């Protein structure tokens, strides 16, 4: 079990555990908005450039299950550092890329490392942090990522204005190298944790662990998938709705920034509520607010209306920062934790890929209004599903007494 809250070295943990996430997310944030533009610069079509962002998600899905082997073999700390170095290498390849094919390969490889980094980081925090602080620790992890993703594009814009597109990739590569260095200051997990993880038979088997926890993945995991679907839709539908109202790109960017500002200011509050009162008191309200916000977006006819809804969506998403990681960590077994979390993350990442496809499909068949209202309804269904399964599982009892 993790150390007690009285003996836990919080200052060292905060600096070394959140530092790599903050640094790497700034680097990622600086380049992700530029990937499609880089592809266009290399001669790709608009359609191919748009598809490139999906390649990142494909790489992550491919590596979600193998990531558990890397984390178990190297240990969480070394796995995080290796993922950061891997990122630095492929960001440098993207910096040097002279063709669309090379850029595509680099983006795919960044997706592979994102899976390893995310799994190892979640597994480490789950093991290292006292249980009564788990939700705050994981929510803060999500919050730090949000802050880095907010700062990154601002830095990237300044770098591009001063130099060029390629310079942003060089900057991101350096940030990932710094993240790898900071990771090495993470304290090692205690030996008893390593012994427990190895188990009596020399180590857990991936598919054995997943089979043993299939019911959890099919119930709570499906709820986590619904969260990812709604979150991914939120990121896409607000800019699309702004465009449908004829708002210019600068207004759209400002609205999105306002929503992100609200989003990244609430992560600690959400974690505190989860630790004090239980996971349901964040999971269900977060999805209800997101569902109502998406449905209300269809009623807006002006920039002011969209701003109000964007703030509501930012609140719903922000209060739920870290909820998927927290539910996964709570549900994960002591033996085979990394293997379980790899399956948990695969289910969630599938939701992140499905969301934009659902939005696109419903919009094509009907309209953007129908898609927005329908996916808002899906969020409300997801809220009910999560509420039921959290209540009927041990997770419903996991909070500070």
Image (cartoon, helix red, strand yellow):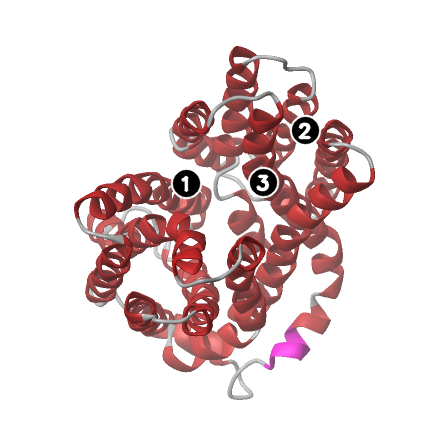
Residue corresponding to mark 3: 231
Q: Residue 317's spot in the image, x, y percent?
A: 53, 33
Q: Nearer the viewer, residue 273 or 141?
A: 141
**Disc nearer the start of the sequence (2/3):** 3
Q: First in sequence: mark 3 or mark 1?
A: 1
Judged from this view, the residue extending furthest toward the right is 365
Above or below: residue 354 compared with residue 103 = above
Please identify, in this view, whether the residue under mark 3 or under mark 1 is nearer the observer: 3
The answer to the question of whether label 2 and label 3 lie on touching residues, with beta carbons closer than 8 A, is no
Image coordinates for residue 188, horizontal then vertical, percent: 28, 69
Mark 1 sits on what residue? Answer: 136
Quadrant in which residue 328 is drawn = bottom right
Magenta part of the chain: 205-209
Q: Residue 195 colored magenta?
A: no
Q: Is residue 199 left or right of residue 158?
A: right
SS type, badge 3: helix
Place of residue 78 in the rendered image (x, y in percent of width and height, measured from the top left): 31, 74
Within-10-Å neighbours for mark 1: few <14, some 14–19, many 20+: many
Left or right side of 399 for 73 = left
Is 30 on the left or on the right of 317, as rendered?
left
Measure the alpha-carbon separation of dots 3 and 1.
20 Å
Name the residue beneath numbered marker 2: 291
The span from disc 2 to disc 1 (Cα, nearest Å) is 24 Å
């Amino acid at each position: 079990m993790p150390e007690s809250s009285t003996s836990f070295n919080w200052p060292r943990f905060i600096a070394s555990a959140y530092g790599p996430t903050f640094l790497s997310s700034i680097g990622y944030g600086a380049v992700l908005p530029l990937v499609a533009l880089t592809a266009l610069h290399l001669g790709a079509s608009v359609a191919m450039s748009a598809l490139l962002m999906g390649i990142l998600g494909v790489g992550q899905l491919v590596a979600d299950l193998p990531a558990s082997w890397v984390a178990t073999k190297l240990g969480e700390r070394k796995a995080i550092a290796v993922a950061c170095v891997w990122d630095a290498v492929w960001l440098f390849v993207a910096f040097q890329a002279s063709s669309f094919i090379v850029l595509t390969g680099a983006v795919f490889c960044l997706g592979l490392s994102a899976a390893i980094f995310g799994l190892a980081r979640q597994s480490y925090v789950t093991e290292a942090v006292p249980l009564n602080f788990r939700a705050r620790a994981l929510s803060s992890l999500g919050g730090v990522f949000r802050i880095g993703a907010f700062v990154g594009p601002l830095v990237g814009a300044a770098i591009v204005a001063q130099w060029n597109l390629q310079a942003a990739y060089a900057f991101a590569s350096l940030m990932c190298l710094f993240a790898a260095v900071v990771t090495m200051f993470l304290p090692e997990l205690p030996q008893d944790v390593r012994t427990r993880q190895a188990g009596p038979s020399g180590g857990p088997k991936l598919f054995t662990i997943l089979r043993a926890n299939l019911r959890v993945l099919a119930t709570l995991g499906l709820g986590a998938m619904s969260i990812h679907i709604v979150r991914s839709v939120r990121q896409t539908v607000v800019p699309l709705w702004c465009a449908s109202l004829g708002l210019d790109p600068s207004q759209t960017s400002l609205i999105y920034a306002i929503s992100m500002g609200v989003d990244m200011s609430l992560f600690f509050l959400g974690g505190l509520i989860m630790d004090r009162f239980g996971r349901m008191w964040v999971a269900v309200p977060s999805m209800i607010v997101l569902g109502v916000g998406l449905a209300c977006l269809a009623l807006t006819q002006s920039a002011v209306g969209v701003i109000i809804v964007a703030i509501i969506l930012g609140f719903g998403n922000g209060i739920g920062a870290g909820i998927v990681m927290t539910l996964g960590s709570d549900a994960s077994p002591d033996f085979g934790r990394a293997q379980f979390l790899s399956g948990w993350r695969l289910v969630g990442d599938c939701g992140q890929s499905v969301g934009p496809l659902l939005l696109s499909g419903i919009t094509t068949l009907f309209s953007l209004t129908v898609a927005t209202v329908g996916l808002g309804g899906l969020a409300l269904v997801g809220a009910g599903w999560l509420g039921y399964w959290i209540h009927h599982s041990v997770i419903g009892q996991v909070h500070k007494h």
